[in-house]
Image (spheres, rainbow, N blue to C red):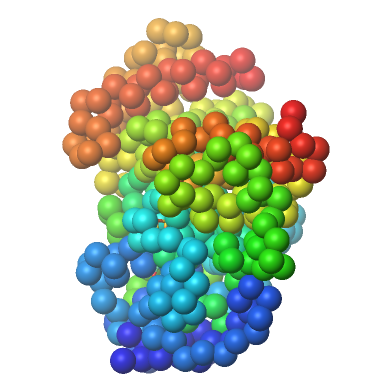
Amino acid sequence: MNTVSVTFTINGEKETRQVRTDMTLLKFIRETLLLTGTKEGCGEGECGACTVIMNGKAVHSCMVLAAEIDGADIQTVESLAGSGELDKLQLKFMEHGAVQCGFCTPGMLMTAKALLNSNPNPTKAQIKEAIAGNLCRCTGYKQIIAAIQDSSRGGRK
Amino acid sequence: MEYLKPVSRKELHLLLKKKGKNLRLLAGGTDLLVRIRHGKESPALIVDLKGIRGFDKISSNKKFISIGPCVTLQAIAEHDEIRRNFPALAEASRSVGSWQIRNRAPLAGNICNASPAADTLPVLVLYDARVKLSHSGRRRILSMKRFLTGPGKSALRPDEYLSEIRLPLPGEKRVLFEKFSRRKGLDLSTVSLAAGIFGRRNRVRLAIGACAPIVKRQTEAEDFLNEHGLQDKDLELACSLLQLSPITDLRGKAAFRRHIAARLVVATMKKLREDR
Ligand SMILES: Cc1cc2nc3c(=O)[nH]c(=O)nc-3n(C[C@H](O)[C@H](O)[C@H](O)COP(=O)(O)OP(=O)(O)OC[C@H]3O[C@@H](n4cnc5c(N)ncnc54)[C@H](O)[C@@H]3O)c2cc1C
Ligand code: FES
Ligand code: FES
């Protein structure tokens, strides 16, 4: 079994770990770091449930090897309420009923967070394009889009 | 499985030379990790290309825009100079997978995968893109036609890697990319198409993806249109000259693909002829 050493920042904290080379970032986050907010749906890039922010960009953690995160900055859904208070996005998701079973929510939130970080005032079309890779079988997306729009700098248009 | 991340070209060249066959290059990993997961591949060594300086850069000179092997599809979709000169490449890049996939997957990975359904190929073929294949002490520059040798197959040798993609300047604005898939976003193309009108002589170029083992220019249809014009009747006749050999799979039956390809050709050429 091969391992490599990786030093990375997870939700603001710097860590160094020995990781198996065949382990995905998703498995590493859930089973080694025990941050189980990030979900596994398909395991192959189709559903977006595993989305985390890596170096400022939304990525599928199931499509990244843990070995690849040396030097990287990773944010998972746990970072949103890191200060003890819910993020505006989380509050708006609740307000708009954008959560039903909740399985897609962590991934959806992280995609939305990455979008708002890079574009604080996205149009509806830009929101749709950003979350096209996040599947939700419950809500029908309308509430999710509304929640993201409402969280943006300009509020709801 | 061993994982290495060289930090210089020299180191990479040495690895390729020494390890050759059981080695897999990793760029975005969006193809490779799925294949490993499905047990279709089990490389002994993974060599991550993302540690090499300059591999994630886009630069240009008077003759061409040069794209490094780790430049992501999202970076291409957002790049001003590419959008100005090669808008259809930005468009095709933007159509791949999802935002998360595009944030990871480089254009080079899409090319090296050499899938008949890879969305950037029709556009790259149309723009006459070149790829540079490197190896210690040697390199060659190939046209897409010489690079793509079969479905999933390319001219890459085990000890070579794709080190640069070149887009010859000036580009052409009058090029359209169309993708027909079962659902919008996150689906491979049932049929894709790039069509354009090039240069002062207004020459038609046409390439269709996901309908033949290799993505290449539709030269017979192009010649016909260049000779006869772009009237409705010419467009219909040109469709009968398309060189297609589609397969039947979950994305569509062969006959359906032929039908869609013809409809896309007609619709796209109609849009383009207004610019001629
Ligand atoms: C959910 C999902 C949706 C997708 N949707 C689309 C789509 O809509 N359209 C589409 O075209 N594709 C799609 N793909 C396929 C894939 O994302 C793209 O082909 C992508 O561009 C591959 O690039 P990569 O670097 O991530 O792949 P990798 O797996 O890193 O590389 C692909 C192959 O090329 C080799 N390679 C990579 N770089 C080099 C290099 N510089 N030199 C030599 N060899 C190299 C690798 O060893 C590997 O065999 C999708 C994939 C997923 C998982
Ligand atoms: S679990 Fe990663 S995209 Fe589905
Ligand atoms: S709330 Fe159930 S999948 Fe989205």
Q: Tell which of A32 and B241 is nearer to you.
A: A32
- Residue found at x 73% / y 32%: A156
Is any part of residue A65 visible from this angle? Answer: no
**Image side of residue B121 versus residue B11, left or right:** left
Image-quadrant location for residue B207:
top left
Q: Position of residue B194 (x, y in %)?
A: 48, 34
Q: Position of residue B247 (x, y in %)?
A: 20, 38
Q: Tell which of B120 and B228 is nearer to you.
A: B120
Q: Tell which of B58 and A58 is nearer to you.
A: A58
**Image side of residue A66 versus residue B56, left or right:** left
- Residue found at x 74% / y 47%: A119
- Residue found at x 63% / y 51%: A90
Number of dots carrying numbers: 0
- Residue found at x 50% / y 20%: B269
Is B120 located above or below residue B273 in the figure?
below
Image-quadrant location for residue B148:
bottom left
Q: Position of residue A54 (x, y in %)?
A: 60, 67
Is B215 located above or below residue A50 in the figure?
above
Q: Tell which of A9 and B236 is nearer to you.
A: A9
| Quadrant where the N terminus of chain B is found in the figure | bottom left
Is B33 located above or below residue B264 in the figure?
below
